[in-house]
Every structure is written in C-alpha cells, then in structure tokens.
Image (cartoon, rainbow, N blue to C red):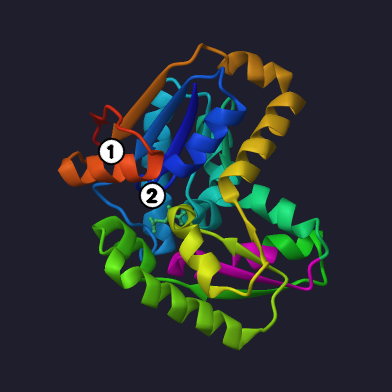
Amino acid sequence: MIGFFDSGFGGLTILKEVEKTLPNFSYIYLGDNARAPYGGHSQEIIYQYIIEGVEELFRQGAKLVILACNTASAVALKKLQQEWLPLHYPDRRVLGIFNPIVEEAGAHNFKTIGLFATQATVESEAFIREIVKIDMDVTVFQQACPLLVPIIETGNFDQLESVVQKYAQELSEKSNPMDAIILGCTHYAIVAKTFRKYLPAGIKIFSQGEIVAKKLKEYLDRHPEFKGKLKEGEKKIFLTTENSPHVQVLAELFYGEKIDLFVVSLS
Ligand code: DGL
C-alpha cells in the first residue's frame, strides 16, 4: 500500500491526482484532523506529529508514505529521511510533495517565482533552499497566507475573495511581474480559480497534484524492486484522528466524493 499523510484532508487533492495516474495501487490516507492545521505550530511539534502519523501508516501496512502536506514536507522531510527512517524503518520510504514541485519549477529557467504557502512553510525557507540547488538565478518571493487554511476549513467562503486579493496584492508589491506562481499548500488547490482571478492574466500556476503524480510514477519506474512491493490491487482506506459531520464535509470537499472514515488515535 502507498500511504498518504497530511495534517488534515488537503492532501486528498494530491491523492486524487495520484490515483488517476497510478490506478492499480492500494492507498491508505491518514489525516490528523484532531490536530490540524499544522501551519502555525513550531517545527519541533510538527516533526513529532508527523513521526506519529507515518508510524501509524507503516503499522497499517504502508511500505511507502507520501507526506501529502507542504508544511510537513518543508519542515520535517529531510530530517525524517536522514535521521529517523534509517534508524527505525530502513526498508521503507517517505517522500514529500515539495521536491516534485521544486524540480518542476526549477527546470523552467524562471527569473522570479511567487510562492503562496502557510506560515510554517514560509518560515522554513525550504522552497528557496531547494530551488537554488537546481536554478541559482531564480529569485523566490514568498507570501504567507495564514488566514486561508482556516477559511477553507471552516467553510467561511464569503471572506475568501478579499483575503486572496489581499495576499495577491502583497506578493505583487514584493515583485512585479512574476514569471510563475506556486500554490504551495494542498488546501489552495480547491481555490485555485480565486487565485487566478487576482493574479496577472496568463501567469503560469503550477498544479501540485498533477506534478506529484507524475514524479511519483517516475520514482516507481526507477525503483521496480520497490514498486513490486506496493502492487496489491485497488484498495482504499481513509483514516482520521477525528471524525465529525464537519470532518466528513471536508473529506468530500477535498476528495470530491463521500468516503468512509475510520478513526485512529496517534501518540
Ligand atoms: N496541508 C497543509 C499544507 O499543504 C496545510 C494545512 C496545515 O497548515 O496543516 O501546507
């Protein structure tokens, strides 16, 4: 099984795209809804939560886990891959959704890229650190959007337009024009149209789900020995640390259809 971990259900937008590209695998998704969002937490807390989530997915049988959360990938992935995984699960893999987008964006020779993301992702500066390894000449302008995840999670969409407009305006004051935009938070995928409305016409906006799906397929093709371990039919399991009518609404919002949820407890 391929596991997906996210602070909540935003990562379902990534899973949806991965399933289209790789339909013959089994998937297990875990959203830590009881403790979401992670975006305002310290790096230490986020790291601890992620280890608990990944460990649960391993326990449930996942051999490969995707951190389907930019905040998690930006803050914890490297440390987890270099320190925790080799010590505790040397035969399993954890991949992030940050590097695929960095590789894709870095291959275009852009001069300027705008990044919208959570506060924790922006503070980690992981995107800037990684992209300059691929393209030394690119300048990244970051815009934290702390109000956006809460707006999407609480369904207060009447505030969405003005908040997106404000963030787009703030970013354009840092650099104008910009060559491309990355919506660096899984939640933003479902409000991409609103971003488009307040960004310069025709600007390239990367779709993270599609890029992650493409890069994951390439990864599995490069690692046939690992791919063989994952091919187990077409089962799908959805786990959450909290269930409620609201959590079910979020599942449908991000996944586009109703799903059966099973509750697990972490820590
Ligand atoms: N899913 C997270 C991301 O992609 C955002 C939600 C959170 O702050 O936990 O950054």
**Residue at the disc numbered 1:** 266
Residue under the image location 76 percent in, 59 percent down: 106
Q: Secondary structure at mark 1?
A: loop
**Residue hosting label 2:** 48
Q: Position of residue 185 (x, y in %)?
A: 49, 57
- Residue 116 counted in the magenta span: yes
Looking at the rendering, which quadrant does residue 150 occupy? bottom left
Q: Position of residue 83 (x, y in %)?
A: 56, 44
Q: Is residue 85 above or below residue 168?
A: above
In the visual, does 263 lie left or right of 174?
left
The residue segment tinted magenta is 110-129
Q: Secondary structure at mark 2?
A: helix
Instruction: Identify which amino acid the numbered label 2 is placed on.
Output: Gln
* Residue drawn at the location 19% of the way across and 47% of the way down: 246
- The Cα–Cα distance between marks 2 and 1, rounded to whole angstroms, is 11 Å
Q: Mark 2 touching mark 1, by CB under 8 A?
A: no
User: Can you tell which mark lies on residue 251?
Assistant: none
Q: Position of residue 215 (x, y in %)?
A: 68, 39
Specify whether 175 is left or right of 191: right
Q: Is residue 210 above or below residue 75?
A: above
Looking at the picture, does residue 7 appear above or below residue 86? below
